[in-house]
Each structure stands twice: as C-alpha cells, then as structure tokens.
Image: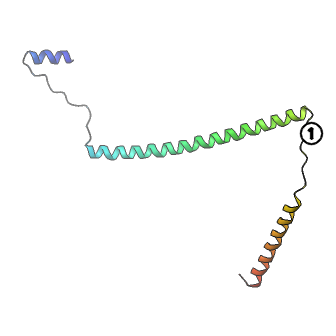
C-alpha cells in the first residue's frame, strides 16, 4: 500500500485521501472518559485486593488448624500426655471477683439515682 502511494507521488499524481474509519474524540472528552475508566479500575483493584486478602487469611487459618490437628494426633500417638487444664491463678480470680462486685455496686448506685 505504501509502495503504491510512493509510485503515485513519484509520477506526480496525488493518491486519494483515505478517511479514518472511526471518529477521534476531542481531548476534553478523552480526558473525562479516561478519568472514569481509571476510577472504575481503581475500585475494581480495591475490591479484588480485599477479596484476595480474605481468601489468603482463610486459607492460612484452615492450614494452621489442619497442621495443629495433625501435630496433636502425632503427639498423642507418641505417648505424649495431653496438657492438663490448670486451675486459674488465685490472684486473677480475686481480681475478677472484685471487678464483678464493683460492677454490682455501680449498678445499685445507678438504680438509686434513677439514671
């Protein structure tokens, strides 16, 4: 095609002008549409990133649970004694009891003052 045009130009003839098969948008329109496209792409990437994060966390959680179960089974097969549940620390128990009592006192005060 370029060769034909070159021969016509060398012979002194002008090749016919071809029209562009599509309309070229103005710069302002192009700027607006590209801005919209970039915004959509940004939202899409944000959603996909969050999806990938959630899937990865779920996968890691499941893998950890499976590994934990397998490890517990192997330890039990080897004759290891499963951990015995210990009695809670006496100090922590008394602190929790005091907290509960303080909460009850606060509730009584609120009832007396009609709050």
Where residue 78 sits, quadrant-wise, is: top right
Q: Residue at x 40, y 44 (%)?
A: 38
Name which residue lies at 8% across and 19% down. 13
Q: Nearer the viewer, residue 64 or 23?
A: 64
Residue 86 location (% of width, % of height): 90, 51
Please rate how many residues cluster around mark 1, counting C-alpha atoms within 10 Å: few if below 14, some from 14 to 19, many from 20: few
Please give left or right for residue 16 compared with residue 36 in the image.
left
Q: Which residue is mark 1?
A: 81
Q: Residue at x 38, y 46 (%)?
A: 36
Q: Residue furthest left?
A: 12
Q: Is residue 3 above or below residue 46?
A: above
Query: Quadrant of the rendered structure where residue 56 is?
Result: top right
State whether residue 64 is above or below residue 87: above
Residue 83 or 66: which is nearer the viewer? Answer: 83
- Single out the residue that lies furthest toward the bottom: 113
Left or right, residue 47 beside residue 22: right
- The image shows residue 111 at horizontal and vertical percentages of 76, 81
Q: Position of residue 12 (x, y in %)?
A: 6, 18
**Colour pattern of the rendering:** rainbow
Location of residue 80 by image quarter: top right
Q: Residue at x 62, y 43 (%)?
A: 54
Element marked by disc 1:
loop
Quadrant in the picture for the C terminus: bottom right
Give the x, y percent position of residue 97.
Answer: 85, 67
Residue 76 is left or right of residue 112, and the answer is right
Count of picture labels? 1
Position of the N terminus, as image quadrant, is top left
């Amino acid at each position: 095609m370029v060769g034909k045009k070159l021969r016509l130009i060398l012979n002194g003839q002008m090749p016919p002008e071809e029209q562009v098969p599509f309309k070229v948008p103005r710069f302002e329109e192009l700027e607006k549409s590209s801005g919209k496209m970039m915004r959509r792409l940004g939202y899409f990437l944000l959603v996909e990133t969050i999806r990938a994060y959630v899937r990865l966390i779920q996968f890691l959680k499941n893998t950890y649970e499976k590994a934990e179960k397998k490890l517990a089974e192997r330890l039990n097969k080897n004759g290891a004694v499963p951990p015995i549940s210990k009695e809670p620390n006496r100090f922590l128990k008394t602190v929790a009891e005091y907290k509960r009592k303080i909460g009850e006192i606060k509730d009584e005060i609120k009832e007396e003052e009609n709050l």
